[in-house]
């Protein structure tokens, strides 16, 4: 064989290997450019079949098979926003829970599939993934519970098989077949088209049109019909073409379709802040909340940053959360995307994106060992009481509604608590639920089952809530006579004196408290039928307390770990440096003074039911600080300026004495030299 033939064979072999490798690498497409690729793409349905968008009976597009044609969908669904239900994924640092709120029963249960301490697994409470989606779908990006269809257990016997067919699991399996899966909707975050509507997304989910939600929300097609109107046993295959009962119909927008029947997707690589804000906004609530227009955005956003500059990710969508010590699933070093890593960490290349290095002039280094950056720089400043706030996930911010400050669940912030010796600001929510107590263990009962068991007892009207029902007390004639006397009880309300009105208000409050006690007894009695654990007793947890029956017509309350607040750290909004603690006229006295808000502010538990004596703690108690030591340390700062002056004076005096002795020494030496 000639050497030329040998070279040819080797080149062909090398080319074959490269082609094989190229084939593997090109399974998913990328441009490797910072320019934005223009997406004119074919649509594919949930069966991975190409869609003709001009057809009258076109199915909705599937993000899994449409976007997944070029992008690794299996990798995407492992990302932090979608993998909560995956028990093999890392739980990560505890974050904001999903809060199951039901005003009809005074319920607010912090939930998470991640197993964070203080939260409850929805499945353990008998809440199916479908129920979870229908409850929280407004702020779910798809995937996770939206694609978790549990198998229906098979039963051997005829009776068991019939029971299985009528079971909740079997009925929901039929509903899943009609609604389709709720895929991860890539365009929730990556749409550059401001016509994308989360409100439409939520409407479609409420209609059980899971598979149609992405199409309708993006606005590339209109959807007619509701799966929620169809019976459980509806069979699309046998339905007549002109029947009113049929699956939703999709009509695509022809203006978005080209001659090749490809559809235009206005895609953006880096999500816009507006997409992040939909799920990650907070709103100051409560009676004394400041007006929204007086509040500034996070200092980083005002400087021109986007959320995704710091909270970035690759195709696997493991979004960097940005806390110190974070270990990224990819193994990448993300230290420079935390506060310290970006602003102070020279070792890992701090100063990214032009981040200034703070001087912290005059600040004792001990502060950096005891305080997180966010303790001084994040959230609104404390002014005596942790404030009531609302969040997107808990209160449905981002959707049009008549939002008022007292819409549950009540969340308080900032709550300063230590973690491994470091002080961090947290948000806090107090669990409230009807549950069962077995020994020292308290667990919630299924919230929907509780409503069914108590609705005849509570009699909460449509549009009202349990608290309003309890407080809706009408004083009768004898009540007014008791408070005002027989003569004044007949006087019209507008003619009563302020003192008399106060007496009636006090009596109304007394009757409401009595009504609440009766309601508690009735509710605890009603949920007895839901108790499953042998020897367990019914309890109601709310605002830091646990209530249980004490006899037939009274209740007793006590504190328990199950009633303690669930806390999660927060970092945004970051205030400008000039608004941080320790800066400005007060300086050190922001924290080191008697009654300093950082330690003396109070945190009062919030529930959905009346409570004359709500659980309240000073911030230093929650943080585990000794008040006496704090006060002694604060008092020492009162003499700090004088101490400085005394110190300077003493140093000057000592310097003069030393100088005098030095001069005398020099004079002695000179005299000795002169004599010689």
Image (spheres, rainbow, N blue to C red):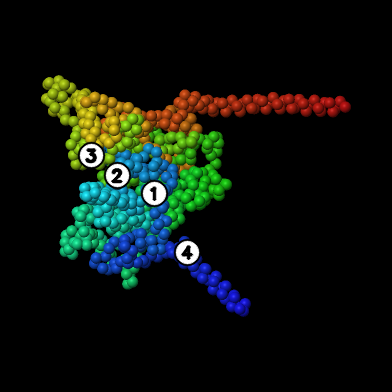
Q: Earlier in the sequence, mark 1 or mark 2?
A: 1
Tell me residue 267's x, y (percent).
38, 61
Residue 444 vs residue 321, the one in the foreground:
444
Callout 3 environment at 10 Å: few (<14), some (14 to 19), or many (20+)? Answer: many
Name the image quarter holding residue 465. top left
Of tags 3 and 2, the one toward the viewer is: 2
Can you say which quadrant of the picture contains the C terminus?
Answer: top right
Say whether marks 3 and 4 touch (CB < 8 Å). Answer: no
Q: Residue at x 41, y 38 (%)?
A: 426
Q: Under tag 1, what secondary structure?
A: loop
Counting residues from the N terminus, which is met first, the one under dot 4 or under dot 1?
4
Q: Position of residue 406 (x, y in %)?
A: 29, 38
* Mark found first going from the N terminus, 4 or 2: 4
Which residue is label 2 attached to?
127
* Pointers 4 and 1 in contact (C-beta within 8 Å): no
Q: Which mark is residue 86?
A: 1
Using the rendered image of the protein, determine whether residue 505 is visible from the camera's viewpoint. no
Q: Position of residue 498 (x, y in %)?
A: 21, 26
SS for tag 4?
A: helix
Task: Of the two numbered discs 3 and 2 on the same chain, state the one appearing first in sequence.
Answer: 2
Rounded to the nearest angstrom, the CA distance separating label 3 from label 4 is 54 Å
Q: Marks 4/2: CA distance?
A: 41 Å
Q: Which residue is mark 4?
A: 25
Distance from disc 3 to disc 2, alpha carbons, whole Å, reads 14 Å
Task: Compute the Cα span from label 1 to label 2.
Answer: 16 Å
Taking the image as shown, residue 336 lies to the left or right of residue 676, namely left
Residue 601 to residue 274: above or below: above
Mark pair 4, 1: CA separation: 27 Å
Q: Which residue is mark 3?
A: 451
Category of crowding for the residue at label 4, using alpha-carbon neighbours closer than 10 angstroms: few (below 14), some (14–19), many (at least 20): few
């Amino acid at each position: 064989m000639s050497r030329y033939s040998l070279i040819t064979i080797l080149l062909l072999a090398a080319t074959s290997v490269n082609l094989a490798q190229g084939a593997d690498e090109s399974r998913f497409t990328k441009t490797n450019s910072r320019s934005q690729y223009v997406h004119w793409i074919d649509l594919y349905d949930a069966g991975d079949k190409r869609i003709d968008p001009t057809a009258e009976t076109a199915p909705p597009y599937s993000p899994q098979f449409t976007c997944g044609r070029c992008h690794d969908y299996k990798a995407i669904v492992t990302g932090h926003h979608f993998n909560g239900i995956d028990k093999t994924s890392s739980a990560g640092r505890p974050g904001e829970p999903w809060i199951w709120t039901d005003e009809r029963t005074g319920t607010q249960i912090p939930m998470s599939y991640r197993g964070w301490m203080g939260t409850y697994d929805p499945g353990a409470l008998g809440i199916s993934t479908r129920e979870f989606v229908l409850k929280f779908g407004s702020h779910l990006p798809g995937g996770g519970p939206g694609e978790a269809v549990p198998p229906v257990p098979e039963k051997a016997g005829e009776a068991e098989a019939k029971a299985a067919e009528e079971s909740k699991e079997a009925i929901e399996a039929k509903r899943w077949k009609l609604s389709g899966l709720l895929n991860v909707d890539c365009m929730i975050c990556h749409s550059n088209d401001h016509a994308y509507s989360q409100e439409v997304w939520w409407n479609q989910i409420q209609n059980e049109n899971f598979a149609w939600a992405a199409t309708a929300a993006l606005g590339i097609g209109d959807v007619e019909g509701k799966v929620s109107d169809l019976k459980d046993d509806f069979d699309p295959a046998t339905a007549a073409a002109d029947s009113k009962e049929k699956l939703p119909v999709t009509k695509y927008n022809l203006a978005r379709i080209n001659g090749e029947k490809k559809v235009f997707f206005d895609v953006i690589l880096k999500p816009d802040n507006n997409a992040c804000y939909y799920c990650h906004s907070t709103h100051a609530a409560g009676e004394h909340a400041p007006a929204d227009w007086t509040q500034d955005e996070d200092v980083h956003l005002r400087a021109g940053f986007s959320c995704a500059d710091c909270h970035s990710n690759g195709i696997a969508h493991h979004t960097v959360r940005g806390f110190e010590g974070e270990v990224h699933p990819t193994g990448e070093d993300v230290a420079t995307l935390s506060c310290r890593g970006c602003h102070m960490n020279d070792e890992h290349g701090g100063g990214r994106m032009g981040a200034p290095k703070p001087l912290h002039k005059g600040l004792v280094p001990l502060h950096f060992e005891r305080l997180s950056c966010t303790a001084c720089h994040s959230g609104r400043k404390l002014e005596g009481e942790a404030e009531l706030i609302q969040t997107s996930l808990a209160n449905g911010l981002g959707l049009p509604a008549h939002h008022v400050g007292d819409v549950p669940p009540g969340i308080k912030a900032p709550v300063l608590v230590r973690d491994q010796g470091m002080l961090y600001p947290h948000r806090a929510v107090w669990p409230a639920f009807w549950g069962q107590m077995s020994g020292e263990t308290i667990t919630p009962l299924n919230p929907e089952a509780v409503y069914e068991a108590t609705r005849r007892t509570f009699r909460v009207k449509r549009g009202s809530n349990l608290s309003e029902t309890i407080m809706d007390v009408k004083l009768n004639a004898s009540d007014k006579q008791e408070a005002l006397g027989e003569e004044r009880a007949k006087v019209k309300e507008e003619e009563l004196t302020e003192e008399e009105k106060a007496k009636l208000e006090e009596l109304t409050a007394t009757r409401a408290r009595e009504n609440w006690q009766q309601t508690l007894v009735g509710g605890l009695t009603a949920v007895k039928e839901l108790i499953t654990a042998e020897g367990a007793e019914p309890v109601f947890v709310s605002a830091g307390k646990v209530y249980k029956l004490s006899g037939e017509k009274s209740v007793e309350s006590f504190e328990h770990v199950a009633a303690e607040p669930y806390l999660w750290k927060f970092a945004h909004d970051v205030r400008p440096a000039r608004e941080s603690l320790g800066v400005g006229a007060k300086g050190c006295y922001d924290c080191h003074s008697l009654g300093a808000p950082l330690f003396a502010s109070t945190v009062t538990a919030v529930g959905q039911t009346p409570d004359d004596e709500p659980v309240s703690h000073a911030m230093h108690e929650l943080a585990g600080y000794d008040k006496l030591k704090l006060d002694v340390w604060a008092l020492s700062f009162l003499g700090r300026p004088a101490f400085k002056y005394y110190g300077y004076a003493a140093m000057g005096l000592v310097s003069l004495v030393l100088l005098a002795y030095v001069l005398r020494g020099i004079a002695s030496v000179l005299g000795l030299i002169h004599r010689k």
